[in-house]
Image (cartoon, grey):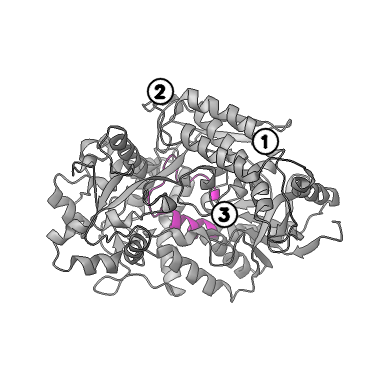
Amino acid sequence: MADPSHTIHEHDVIVIGAGGAGLRAAIEASASGVSVGLVCKSLLGKAHTVMAEGGVAAAIGNVDDRDGWQVHFADTMRGGQYLNNWVMAEIHAKEAPARVLELEAWGAVFDRTKDGRVLQRNFGGHKYPRLAHVGDSTGLEMIRTLQDHGIHQGIEVYMEHTVTTLLKDGDRVVGAFGYDRERGRFRIYKAAAVVLATGGIGRAYKITSNSWEYTGDGHALAYNAGADLVDMEFIQFHPTGMVWPPSVRGILVTEGVRGEGGRLLNNKGERFMFDDIPDLYKNQVAKDDEEGWRYVLGDKEAHRPPELLTRDHVARCIVREVKEGRGSPHGGVFLDIAWIKEKMKNAPEHIKKKLPSMYEQFKELANVDITTEPMEVGPTTHYVMGGVRVDGLTQMSTVPGLFAAGEVAAGLHGANRLGGNSLSDLLVFGKLAGEHAARWAKEHGQGHIDAEQARDAEREALAPYERDGAENPYGVQSDLQEMMQEKVGIVRNENDMAAALDAIAALKRRADGVGVEGHREYNPGWHTALDLANLLTVSEAVARSALDRRESRGGHFREDCPDKSDEFAKHNTVVRKGPDGSMQLRREAIPPLRDDLKKVIEEQK
């Protein structure tokens, strides 16, 4: 057994991460009759899910009754450039309405149509208005509702605890090793099954909408335990983050602003998005401004404004405007919602009602009144489509007993995620992960915790205290973020990415020399030092996968290979830790689409 000095917490299922996916997984596992422990890096309620503002995508059909799971499935596959795990895309499209209505039954207070049904708004890449929302605070309402429901399920919560290593018994995962951030005391979480719900990797980049917790912990935990990571080259740069003042650069400006009629303008006042509409979407984009405005208000015209094309495309168009000298004064473009006063007498009140958080955010942080003047926005690192490879039906990874859900898991979104699909992803696959983790725990029971594994994890965690005159962890992290932003960002090329891999190797050597001072209680320098290994792992996975994919598709754009390639159209990129500890990459064919689903896509075209 483990060292008796380690505090041991024993459960049937341990869920790591307390955002939407983690909470939904914990609720479902607990409802299955097993003991559940929920480990979260920060305080409960501070999950990054609260920053998801625009809405949750589900084909309920309350605003446009032509919507249905088939349309949602086809939109998701088209947005993902057909690299999606189509099993997950089908389950997601079919199950999302039930999960949203379940959330409503648990107390979520969605905005309403005039006849009292859940209101839905238009969003990028979705054919019809599909996003159920609560103003521009949908993620916050989701977390509130899940927490309020979850506290009655008997779930034990370990707040401000960080997991550093997954523990194994042979091939299977049997628990995790970590520490509490307040006192620095080591913990062992013994469990028959582990669910990863740790979110993304945005802190590997300098400009990001992601909160401080997003250091790729779950990706690295799974990778080091022997699991496959897939499609890590696909990073979504949300087109609209704040660009001014510098202290808030990258903070998200919800797509809901564009969904409510916001227009993107360059410094000449031109709606530049009309200049570059992909062939896939030419029949869906508004022919003129008037049609676009009518559609935004919910008219059943099959048109949308070009500002609501997929995020990868909009982000690249913004970069083009800035590079060609048509950007805003601070290196972005303008996002104007105030113009709707031309169409509405009560426009300021309408904007404040529909976008209350955005109004307050810009008023407080940038001294901009969005009801009267445009915002300055630009792309920000937002989401990773790649992640832990999971079985589409059970959410179990390639390591027995290890499950994953939400952003840390790959498959649903393919090469590019549609706005709003993230929140329904959390609900649908959080539920599945919790359900199947509980079933696995009942069928397989507890495994054996190897004391030496735990001691190795402790020695590794304490290593920064043993180094004198060492590197500063903040300096290494900052240099990594600068390098990733510059060389593996929105626009990529072979020379930059090859240089990025060399830089990552050098940064790893520096990280091995990182030292910290002081004691283990409330020591953010120590926490940063421990995060570095995860950030370096996911950065290498992104750079190595992006270098291998010699084409441009979805969230991966290469200026030296600007077109899609048939060679890369039918496979995923898989990385795994090799026996010698090096990162190994292979290409794996995507299983052929089922005939009935092919027919669905053809009909929707």
Task: Give the Cα distance between marks 1 and 3.
Answer: 22 Å
| Residue under numbered circle 2 | 560
Q: Residue at x 28, y 32 (%)?
A: 324
Q: Amino acid at mark 1?
A: Arg
User: Mark 3 or mark 2, which has the lower sequence index?
Assistant: 3
- The answer to whether any part of residue 95 appears in the image is no
Question: Does 366 appear in magenta?
Answer: no
Residue bounds of the magenta highlight: 408-430
Q: Amino acid at mark 3?
A: Glu
Q: Which one is nearer the viewer's eye here, 278 or 347? A: 347
User: Image quarter for residue 556?
Assistant: top left
| Residue under numbered circle 1 | 510
The image quadrant where one finds the N terminus is bottom right
| Residue under numbered circle 3 | 213
Dot 3 alpha-carbon crowd within 10 angstroms: few under 14, some 14 to 19, many 20 or more: many
User: Image quarter for residue 388?
Assistant: top right
